[in-house]
Image (tube, rainbow, N blue to C red):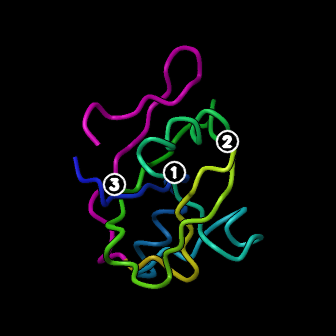
Amino acid sequence: MNEHLIYKILPRSHWEVAETNGRFQGSGIDLEDGFIHLSTKAQSVETAQRYFAGQRDLVLVAVAADELGESLRYEASRGGDLFPHVYGDIPLRAVVRVYPLELNDDQSIRFPTEY
């Protein structure tokens, strides 16, 4: 486990676009809000339950926070928790690993055992 990793949950098709472009430029609410929403490991399960339950063909992208420089800011959001936000693109060099996400029988997201 690396405490300097932050996570983005998104549809696999959006990740495939990022792989083609060499960077992730955001999608959906990211584009509306003007920054890319990410979560810490501790926040990622609630984020998945709140925004992605029942959705298929998702991925969990692990990003090295240290690679993002000044574009990364931790800002108060849900419940006053500080969430990582990226103002700009996420370059592929910052991505450590991409995990496929599956659904449990209750339609909740099943996270990898080790992430």
Q: What secondary structure is marked by label 2?
A: helix
Q: Position of residue 89 (x, y in %)?
A: 51, 81
| Residue bearing the label numbered 2 | 51
Which one is earlier in the sequence, the residue at label 2 or at label 1? 1
Q: What secondary structure is marked by label 3?
A: strand
Q: Is residue 90 left or right of residue 66?
A: right
Q: Are marks 2 and 1 in contact (CB under 8 Å)?
A: yes
Q: Position of residue 54 (x, y in %)?
A: 63, 30
Other residues around mark 3 within 10 Å, as few (<14) / some (14–19) / many (≥20):
some
Other residues around mark 2 within 10 Å, as few (<14) / some (14–19) / many (≥20):
few
Other residues around mark 1 within 10 Å, as few (<14) / some (14–19) / many (≥20):
many
Which one is earlier in the sequence, the residue at label 1 or at label 3? 1
Numbered circle sitting on residue 9: 1
| Residue ID at (65%, 59%) | 76
Which one is earlier in the sequence, the residue at label 2 or at label 3? 2
Image: 21 above or below 76? below
Q: Is residue 80 left or right of residue 40?
A: right
Of 115 and 28, nearer the camera is: 115
| Residue bearing the label numbered 3 | 98
Q: Position of residue 105 (x, y in %)?
A: 53, 14
Badge 2 amino acid: Tyr
Q: CA distance from mark 2 to mark 3?
A: 19 Å
**Which segment did they paint magenta?**
92-115
Which picture quadrant has residue 14?
bottom right
Badge 1 amino acid: Ile
Image: 1 above or below 64? above
Numbered circle sitting on residue 27: none
Q: Is residue 112 magenta?
A: yes
Badge 3 amino acid: Val
Q: Is residue 107 magenta?
A: yes
